[in-house]
Amino acid sequence: MTRKIDSRGLTVEESALRDLARDFFADKVAPLVPQLERDPSELIRPLFAEMGQLDLLGPNFPEAHGGGGGRLRTRAIVSEEAARVNAGLDISMFADVALFARCIDRLGTDEQKRTYLEPVLRGDKIGAMAITEPTGGSDALSPRSRARRTGSGWVLDAAKTFITNAPIADFIVLIARTSGENRQLHGGTWFILERGMPGLVQGPAFRKAGWKSSPTGEVTASSVTLDDTHVLGEPEEGFRYLVDSLDNERVLIGASALGLAQACLELSVRYARERVVFGQAIAGYQLIQDKIATMSAGIELGRTLVYSLLDRIDRGEKVTHQAAVAKLHATELAVQSALDTIQILGGAAYVDDHPATRFLHDAKLHEIGGGTTEIMKIIIARESLRSA
Ligand SMILES: Cc1cc2nc3c(=O)[nH]c(=O)nc-3n(C[C@H](O)[C@H](O)[C@H](O)COP(=O)(O)OP(=O)(O)OC[C@H]3O[C@@H](n4cnc5c(N)ncnc54)[C@H](O)[C@@H]3O)c2cc1C
């Protein structure tokens, strides 16, 4: 028997989690992908509830609040398996747990964790995080959304767009400027919004080019009144959490992109073995092998980097430079792998709704969301110029 060496160095428990996730996404999600891609709104909630029961939503959260007590890398393990089957669904999970739940876990009071974190980890409620505005996402410290203190609490006026899960979310964490000027680190405050609050509108799902299994939309708050129980973390210090959490988010997006690249590799290998051209399987042609080798090498390199960075983040290390490298590498790999998969499949892949075209549309967004490729390169250049 050949034993495959796993570059992630998983423990026995982590391997069991990978197997559980692999079976769940293969058995329960794969058959639903066409339906999810058409309209995810009705399917996500029951799927999240099942995932919650299997402890697939919060393997890296504290047991005291319903999590699995595992390392941050356990989220990456589940993410890779989810994205291997459907990258859009994985992004809805990412917004639910890696963005919303992590923010509550990091900044919330015990009461807020009981109210908002625990039901999300159980899969009973769905979360979202709203940062991006119609004026842009890259310059996240310059929101136009504002909240002002009143005698008894806060009044929020906000307009956010391209928010994953916004159309279906029960809870949303939203950042607004509460003092100071654009680009200032001081003066941002996180608010927890709940579906149905007077003045809160969660828009319908956009019709997107990719990530179709993940509903995306606008969040608008018009003079929403909030008491202090809806303030998350220290008022005025919200941008610090936003900046501090970017390393973690970028590496986890890297894991999702690697899952997608893995799906490309598997489809390419399967097809190349079967497709006979000029009397032999195309897997025998070196130009095809070159593409497969490039995908495989990129995935191995990416995994080695992603999992070691997640462990370093767990240890409290700052890994801004390397996190940008991981996101850049994994997301560019996913796009190139999807392009190469289409090339290997030839005309067969160039039809609507083919998995390979879905891979390409889904992969492309990884180069935009959570910090664009240009922003990753700016960080890498800045850190290199500073330290080299
Ligand atoms: C499907 C989807 C889901 C999303 N989910 C969420 C979510 O859940 N929550 C959330 O808050 N946001 C979300 N986003 C928003 C996402 O994070 C932003 O799209 C991203 O941050 C980029 O912002 P932007 O699209 O406004 O581009 P912009 O910031 O307007 O940038 C436009 C272009 O200019 C480039 N650019 C910007 N600054 C520089 C510079 N200094 N030098 C060189 N080039 C530069 C960018 O790289 C990009 O190519 C989502 C987006 C999509 C499409």
Image (cartoon, rainbow, N blue to C red):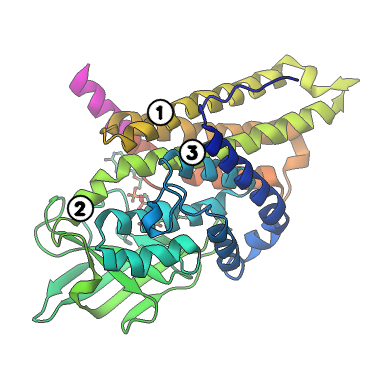
Percent position of residue 49, x then y:
56, 65
Q: Secondary structure at mark 3?
A: helix
* Segment colored magenta: 377-388
Q: CA distance from mark 1 to mark 3?
A: 12 Å
Residue 34 location, quadrant: bottom right
Give the amino acid type for the residue marked by disc 3 in the picture.
Ala
Give the spatial CA distance, label 3 vs label 2: 25 Å
**Residue tagged 3:** 255
Residue at the image point whose x is 63% and y is 41% from the top: 19
The answer to whether residue 321 is magenta is no
> Mark 2 — residue?
239
Q: Which of the two discs, 1 and 3, sits closer to the camera?
A: 1
Callout 1 secondary element? helix
Mark 1 or mark 2: whose residue is earlier in sequence: 2
Disc 2 residue: CB within 8 Å of ligand 1: no
Q: Residues within 10 Å of mark 2 (few under 14, many from 20)?
A: many
Q: Is residue 209 left or right of residue 377?
A: right
Residue 308 - label:
1
